Amino acid sequence: MTVATYLQYFKIYLAQTFEYRTSFFMWRIRQVLSLLLSLFFWGSVYADTATISAYTKDDMIAYLIITNLVFNLVAATSLNSLGSFIYSGELSNFLIKPQNISLYLLSKEAADKLQNLFFSLLEAGGIWLLFQPQTSISLQSLPLLGFFIILGMGVTFCIQLLFGAIGFWSPDTWGPRFLFFTLMGLTSGTLFPLDILPSWFTSTVALTPFPFISYFQGQLALGRVNSDHLWSSFLVAAAWLVALGITAAVVWKKGLKDYDSHGG
Amino acid sequence: MKTAAIVVDHLSKHFKVYKKEPGVWGSIKSLWHREYETVKAVQDISFSIDEGEVIGFIGQNGAGKTTTLKMLSGLLYPTSGEVSVLGYTPWERKPDFQKQFSLVMGQKNQLWWDLPAIETFELNKAIYDIPDNQYKKTLGTLVELLDVADIIKVQVRKLSLGQRMKCELIAALLHNPKLLFLDEPTIGLDVIMQKTLRDFIREYNREFGATIILTSHYMDDVKELCKRAIIIEKGTKIFDGELQSIIAKYAKNKILSLVFSKPVQRSDLEPYGEIKELTQDGTNYTATLLVGRKSATASASKVLSKLPVQDLTIEEPPIEAIIRDVFADTKRS
């Protein structure tokens, strides 16, 4: 069990990504179209008004492009089918070999994130040039932005592990995931900045892991986070990462013991 | 004195399964009420296997063979009982243990479907930490023995079942495992391919002294490879001993399948064995005879010389029939 194992997994998954070209290109087109749709929608909302909450039209365009880019990195995942992978017994092939299952899943995720980063950057860059929002991006916030993107990835990875773990006990993995990810889509801030809603809503959502999927990173890039807000957000995100990480570890330990290894 | 590679002591595995009533109403009812029952997949079995032994693990579908193999390889935790495999408790899943065995399932792929088999081999090299020299040497030997040099760079999904099975075996053997669990390795393969794999498994056992547990539906597999057999039925062990003694006691006949170029009469066939089936429908003239094991070749030779035979095969009786007889005998006693 060496680093070479996980590098090999990383390479294999990267190679597999490009195996089904039509699906790959269709997915990328879907990503671009959904962002364009969102931008055109907000463009029409701004037709009669200069600002919404504290956002000008340019701020909103910049915010939407950045949060969509971040969402593609943080929330897009190769682990959507983890539950059925476990329930169908496919996990057996991996469990039987001298390797760490978390590191294996992490390698798979890393390959998915890398290709997503490359193409999402290209797409976001193209759309930025197309709309040319006149908003200043805080370059000093880039390292922090990177840090919170990685933190967000950690949180979503643990959430994926937890939803996937349902497959140890039930084939019913789709329903709970669907509900959760619908909620996440609404509260992660990719459709609109959360702070245009009433403050009680924003402060409640701030205590959940959802803003760290993309909203908080969008705020950071636009220079809208002061130092108090930064620290409190860091503490909330780190607490979620630790809590979800520990829960995932406990649930997986129990799951691996109860594993039925169906099939074969 | 031989050392035990596997010691199984009063091993049981029970599963809780959901029983669904048939029909749409049953499906709707299952939304709020479900009944579960406990299935005793493996029930209190004990046995021991020495290093280097090749054991036939025989049983009908659902008898508990695969469940036992999954416990021995550490995939499943048992409900009760103790197991020691190469000195390890399998379900602790220790890497040092996992590096010493392989499980090959005829109905499950470990090869990456969209990529050439060589990618899986490279991956296994990394997983099992196989040194470069050993990897190249073992891969070269296995590729040559199984004659797959021209297919290991072809996408797995484009290979035939037989070609895939050969590559599965290579992937499983690259780290020279001391212990092999082979679960139906020849299932779905044609007779020639079955023979190729059997020869290969025998050769692997001879060369590396590996301990092998084989499950198969084909009597030929078990008969050619295993001296000892363990028969399992409904999760319980019903026989453990010399395979030859079961064959002598329960498989006294062989099956002679004949295709004729012209019609033949029942009376023409009666001298050669017990007629199980005779078809004469104007276009097909076929017959199946049960002939004594020892006189099978002589009977076949006489039939060939006396009757208008177009095609002839001599087969072992189906393994299920033998198991049924052993099971019936066990129940009687």
Image (cartoon, rainbow, N blue to C red):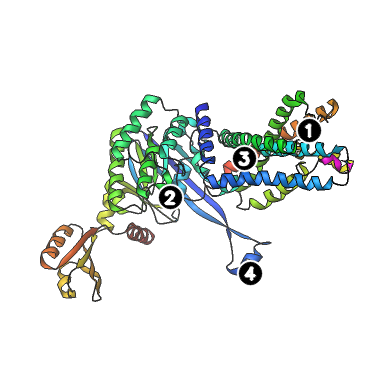
- Determine crowd level at label 1: few under 14, some 14-19, many 20+ residues with C-alpha closer than 10 A: some
Image position, residue A190 (x, y; %)? 75, 42
Which residue is most to the left? B305
Front-most of residues A22 and B187: A22
Structural distance between the alpha carbons of marks 4 and 1 = 48 Å
* Image height of B222 relative to B317, above or below: above
Picture residue at 64% right of the left edge, 63% below the top: B30
Name the secondary structure under disc 3: helix
Asked if marks 1 and 3 fall on the same chain, the answer is yes
Picture residue at 58% right of the left edge, 49% below the top: A84
In the displayed structure, does residue B297 sit left or right of residue B137?
A: left
Do labels 1 and 3 touch, CB within 8 Å?
A: no
Q: Chain of mark 4?
A: B
Q: Earlier in the sequence, mark 1 or mark 3?
A: 1
Front-most of residues B323 and A170: A170
List the residue tagged with mark 2. B107
Do labels 3 and 2 touch, CB within 8 Å?
A: no
Structural distance between the alpha carbons of marks 1 and 3 = 24 Å
Image position, residue B23 (x, y; %)? 59, 69
Image position, residue B64 (x, y; %)? 45, 52
Structural distance between the alpha carbons of marks 4 and 3 = 35 Å
Asked if marks 4 and 3 fall on the same chain, the answer is no
Please state which amino acid type lies under the numbered disc 4.
Answer: Trp
Image position, residue B324 (x, y; %)? 36, 60
Give the main secondary structure of the magenta stretch: loop
How many numbered marks have been drawn onto this rendered protein structure? Answer: 4
List the residue tagged with mark 1. A236
User: Residue B25, which numbered label?
Assistant: 4
Do labels 4 and 3 touch, CB within 8 Å?
A: no
Q: Quadrant of residue B298?
A: bottom left
Please state which amino acid type lies under the numbered disc 1.
Answer: Val
